[in-house]
Every structure is written in structure tokens, then in C-alpha cells.
Image: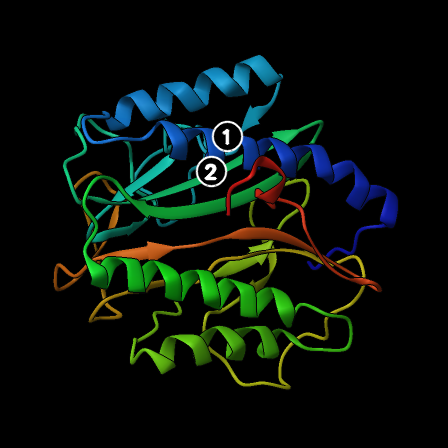
Amino acid sequence: MIELRTPAEIDAMRPAGRFVAEVLATLRDETKVGTNLLHLDRRAHDMIRAAGAESCYIDYHPSFGASPFGKVLCTSINDAVLHGLPHDYVLRDGDLVSLDFAASVDGWVADSAVSFVVGTARDEDLALIDTTQRALAAAIDHATVGNKIGDISAAIAAVAHARDLKINTDFGGHGVGRTMHGDPHVANDGKAGRGYPLRAGLVVALEPWFLHTTDRLVTDPDGWTLRSADGSRGSHSEHTVAITPEGPIVLTDRSFLGVD
């Protein structure tokens, strides 16, 4: 069921958005060559406890997950692009890191993701990250009253196709509110002018994610981590966005912290 939020409810979601933004900005700043993924998860867990927030991940067990997730942060490295389960891995020079984090504050959820490289970056990785960021910006620009879900999907796809990237539509954006995943689904490819009409009060997590040379995924033995089928690297960018009569509001915007 698609739920629309009142202006007061959107205001009530702002603390969750701000908290998620702060956690991701902090983790990005602290993630270096030599950082263990389990340390990042513990750091996020500490910040959740200190803020009196709640994790959206630790007990999460959808049909595609082998078991409850058990951690509070998704850490996807190199050819992993989604749902990376933190494990005992020490980051190496040139690793492409995607961090995805969702939390609930006072009963309202925000969800966001960021990708970056630790140490020496490959040009092709920087280009891939830039593509997901530009696709997210295009999606946000089209998240306006009067447009349709297909307009957002088509805007994301146009950016990817300009770089000759294929697009997987199994996982994409989604409604956000009292829970992390709700209706509507927002695919990363679609046709403009089609789908659910965007109305004031709709809150969605928009999340383009792309792989260098494939749109096919395989699942790790951990039952969660999704990797490219051909070993190519992936990038993931996500923001929680409220659609209002005045235009989109990015609830997880990190610019107030001096980061993108």
C-alpha cells in the first residue's frame, strides 16, 4: 500500500534523515586502507545506541535473505554492490566501498548509501561512482508532483545508458516511512510518463546502482551479499526523498556536513 505523509510527518522524518546522513559521513571519513569491515559495523552500532535510534537491518529477514541480517550496516566491496554482509575483511589499497545504512529515529525511517574508493583509485571506478551520483541527482530532479514513477526510472536509465551500462531491475528504490521498505517500487529503468503518479507526501528511497560490464548478480554463500556475475565492480548511491508541492526534499542530504 502506498502511503502519503503530511507536512508534519515529513518534518518528523527529518531527524532520521539527518542521523543517517551523519553516520554515513562519519563512516566515510573514518574508512581507510586497513579498516576492518567488522569495525565499521561496530562503529555504526555504537552511533545507533548513542542516538537512541534503532537499526532497520539487524533483524531484517526478507524472502531473499538466507537468515536475519544480523548486522546494522551493509558493506559491499569491489564486485559486491548490494546487501554486503560485514565480515572479517581488511580494506586494501584501491578497494571500491559501498556503504548502505538505514535507521529508525522516533519511529521514522531514513535510508541512504554512498560509494567511494580507499587509497589509490582507478579511473574507471571513479567514473562509475560519478555515474551513480549523477543518476541519483537526475532521479531527484524528476521527483516532482505531476510526474510519474516512470519519469524517475527513465531519468536514472538515461544516465546509465549514456555510459553504455546495463541495468538490473531486480532491486531498486522503494517507499520509506514507518518501515524501511514499502510501496512503490522505483526501478532503475523504465518508461517516462508511466506508472504511479507522484503526489505530495510520497517519501521514497531512490537508489541507482550499476556494475561495470553486466546486469547479472550472484549471491555469496553468506546468503546476502550480491556480486556481479562477471567480477566487475559496482557502485551504489541512495537518498531518502520527500515529494512536496515546493519540490523534492532530500532528507538524507549530507551537504550540511560539508560532504557530498
Residue 171 visible to the viewer:
no
CB atoms of marks 1 and 2 within 8 Å: yes
Where is residue 202 shown, x and y percent of the image? 73, 59
Q: Residue at x 18, y 56 (%)?
A: 122
Q: Which residue was labeled with disc 1?
A: 23
Q: Residue at x 55, y 31 (%)?
A: 22
Q: Earlier in the sequence, mark 1 or mark 2?
A: 1
Q: Residue at x 48, y 72 (%)?
A: 156
Q: CA distance from mark 1 to mark 2?
A: 8 Å
Q: Which residue was labeled with disc 2?
A: 101
Q: Is label 1 in a helix, a strand or a loop?
A: helix
Left or right: where does residue 235 sit relative to residue 101? Answer: left
Where is residue 29 shown, x and y percent of the image? 40, 31
- Disc 2 crowd, CA 10 A, few/some/many (<14, 14-19, 20+): many
Q: Residue at x 21, y 38 (%)?
A: 222
Quadrant of the rendered image containing residue 49: top right
The residue type indicated by label 1 comes to: Val
The residue type indicated by label 2 comes to: Phe
